[in-house]
Amino acid sequence: MRTSTPIGRALRAAGIGEVCDDSTTRALYSSDASLYRVPPQAVVRARSIDDVATTLDVCSREGVPLTSRGTGTSLAGNAVGPGVVIDFSRHLNRVLSVDPETRTARVQPGVVQAELQRAAAPHGLRFGPDPSTHNRCTIGGMIGNNACGTRALGYGRTSDNVVALEVLTGTGHPLTLPGEDPVLEPLREIVARDLATIRTEFGRFGRQVSGYALEHLLPENGFDVRKLFVGSEGTLGITTEATVQLVADPAVRTMVVLGYPDIVAAGNAAHGLLGFRPTACEGLDSRIVDIVRHRRGPQAVPPLPSGAAWLFVELAGDDADEVRGRAKALAQAAAATDVLHVEDQARAAALWRIREEGAGLSARSPKGLPAHAGWEDAAVPAHRVGDYLRDFEELLAGYDITGYPYGHFADGCIHIRLDIPLEVPGLFREFLFEAAELVAEYGGSMSGEHGDGRARSELLPVMYSPDALALFGAVKSVFDPENVLNPGVLVDPRPVDADLRVPAAGKIREGLAFRYLEDGGDFTQAVHRCTGVGKCRADNTGTGGVMCPSFLATREEKDSTRGRARVLQEMLNGHLVAESWQSPEVHEALDLCLSCKGCLSDCPTGVDMATLKSEVLHQTYRGRRRPASHYGLGRLPQWAAIASRAPRAVNALVRAPGVAPLGLTVAGLDRRRRVPRFAPRTFRKWFADTLSRRSRTGDPVLLFVDTFTEYFTPEIGVAAVRALEAAGHSVHLTDEPRCCGLTWITTGQLDQARKILGRTVAELFRSGMPIVGLEPSCTAVLRSDAVELLGSAPARLVADSTTTLAELLADWEPPSLDGTRIVAQPHCHHHAVMGWGADAALLRRAGADVQRLAGCCGLAGNFGVERGHYDVSVAVARTQLLPAVEAASDDAVILADGYSCRTQLGDLTTRRGMHLAELLASRLP
């Protein structure tokens, strides 16, 4: 819904080009990665520093708060505000220069940390601090929070790596830090009046992040305002440019994994390892590892030493023998129950990935309940970590609260998300204050990394004296006397339990089509799986991921999984987004969702936006007229069955001048797409015609014949039969043609989909045979969606009995593919639901040279064919598929099991995609 606000109109009148004050954008920016919901009045996507200065001037004049935001990965509510939010990530996101001589880089605040790393890498350099969100967090955000990351032991905090800053104070005054400026003189006077408080309460240990870092203003520390500014959470000024220090990447890295009986023992051991100069020493609970195994399969976790908790230790240097000797000595001194040396960098990367995704993986507690941020990064002096963990576990038990502790154990910083029932009045607040008292008893900090934000600022009196708190207010007044910048944070804080997002949303349990089995039948809980960690804003294709293809194509927040979830969350609380399922904002946000299911596997919290979109479409159009494409592509199996009664006549009609474009237009499809040809003989007809000539001995298997194999590409079914029989199986079909209902599901026709699936599942269940699917999306329906739609015991049994072709042939010795170059495009649903590991293993056994692509092909079932989606569909294809195919040699096989993937190839290239079954059958004797 397009609206405007007074501050939005004032900003446009002042000449700001990108002012977004519509309700959709305000919903998108209403939260960050925290628990807090604070809808802004407007969002400015600044294109220049002049835009930033003008926005600040207008906000000061109008008395409207201003909040700086990178990519919104802040866990404490640091990047939300009730006035104007400046998004630096959209345009002010460049690496301005890299100087290898001085080992520095000049950057704009919106540049993503990983982009800086890529710019520095050709010079053998890197930016030291590396938060787990490094592939989407911005340098400006890291400056705001004084981010640390896994390798803080080796490279320090952000404040240790910032050389210079260009900032605007709350009054719009430009400052260069370090540097002399008359505006800073009152700051010197404030420090001089209370040196004793600063010397005794600040800078006590490395992870004391809470509050302002006033120790840097002490005379003995050179009155370093630059280091004070880093970590001030956007309350003192706005960073417009930064010069950062780079470090040489060491030639050698090795990993030592130490096993311990429990997390307390791991915590006790971590501090004693500092003498071996680790660059990282991270603690991890076995329960997080179990989540990874459950969600992504055992192969996702490399072997670990025995134990229920581990320390992941990294040692680095330029001399391989020296690093290896240090690793051996560390292992001997660690008093671990078991030790594993990991020198293979791929295995090490897989282990570090588990640690990186801790915030998302721990979003479900040991009880299986939603686990929340808010107390996720308290820190204590490192030598007290084990004792603190023991007492903290006792505190949790007293409240019947659970969570998975992990984090920077040798640095004293503990991460955890907790299943605090936020709907119980007062409980969240009571727990936070008691937890704060415990940390204060240990001489610790409310925050050791993420800043105080809205989550912990009110807790600062537990940690600091009234004199220290008065200093905070005095310092704030020097830089921002009108309290324009990020009010409610650090100084005059908002209550820790104000503005919570989850309790504001009503629960929806009745009248739903899907069962949301892992969310207690609650649509609201399923939507709030999105905690905002923002992995969907990263380019995950480098790790073999899929999520989120539309964001990679448009770079718009509304086209990320998180953006869509935020709009749905606003729909549930009914304020900004007020028309429930039919809300224009909801449909605008969901329009470019490809329903690829990439988020189901790639999002650490397991958001399934494809299912949520289907539910929204179901609720929106139930009993109402639907878009034309729902009647066309949404009921494709019905139309295909009719057309295949006279396939030659239909094909001839489609080839007649003007018929295909007219038909596409009427069906709500893009005229640039081609109408596929119907096969002259269906697969089932071929199967019946050749039944008498084939062997019926061997292990029986039921081949699930999908619509695409049956009517469009029966040659794939024929190839599958050949491969299965060669592997010693007897192939059977259902008595009647059966459909998985996929096209009804993706268009939200869920009542009809349930009926279709019910009949299909009943017959598959009665067969009692293993079921093998050929079309990945249809196989995924049987493995996943059928259970969610039907919830029956037969559906579960069918899901357990359904395999991909590669899974079924796991013990078969395939025909030789030696020397065969393969460019493989795994179907998104294959990746997300079944995983492509079995296919990779089979091809490896056959001797093929495989280049596995990540990302989506861009067609994604009906998405890329629908009118209005073509350009985005092609842009998605260009992220991975098209460049790889263009670069492939003429003799390379383009492997694409998905009908949509092969269709996209046929529409956009001259290459033909081949199904795995065809490839195997082509090499049989």
Image (cartoon, grey):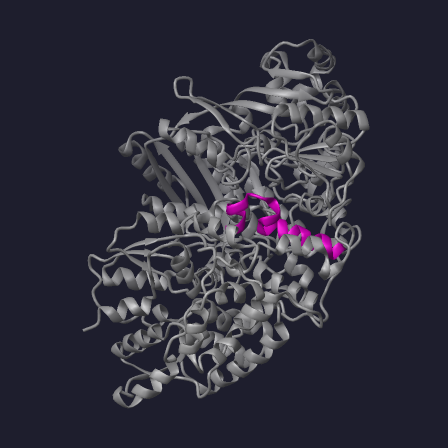
Compared to residue 126, the image places residue 586 above or below, namely below
Q: Nearer the viewer, residue 588 or 61?
A: 588
For the C terminus, give its image quadrant. bottom left
Residue at 79% from the left image edge and 50% from the top image edge: 426
Magenta range is 548-573
Compared to residue 530, the image places residue 634 above or below, namely below
- Percent across and percent down for residue 508 are 72, 64
Residue at 66% from the left image edge and 63% from the top image edge: 616
Q: In this rendering, does residue 870 appear at all?
A: yes
Left or right relative to 449: residue 437: right
- Percent across and percent down for residue 170 are 72, 23
The mark total stands at 0
Dominant secondary structure, magenta: helix
Question: Is residue 617 inside the magenta stretch?
Answer: no
Question: Is residue 557 inside the magenta stretch?
Answer: yes
Left or right relative to 474: residue 881: left
Left or right relative to 275: residue 497: right
Q: In this rendering, does residue 772 appear at all?
A: no
Q: Quadrant of residue 218?
A: top right
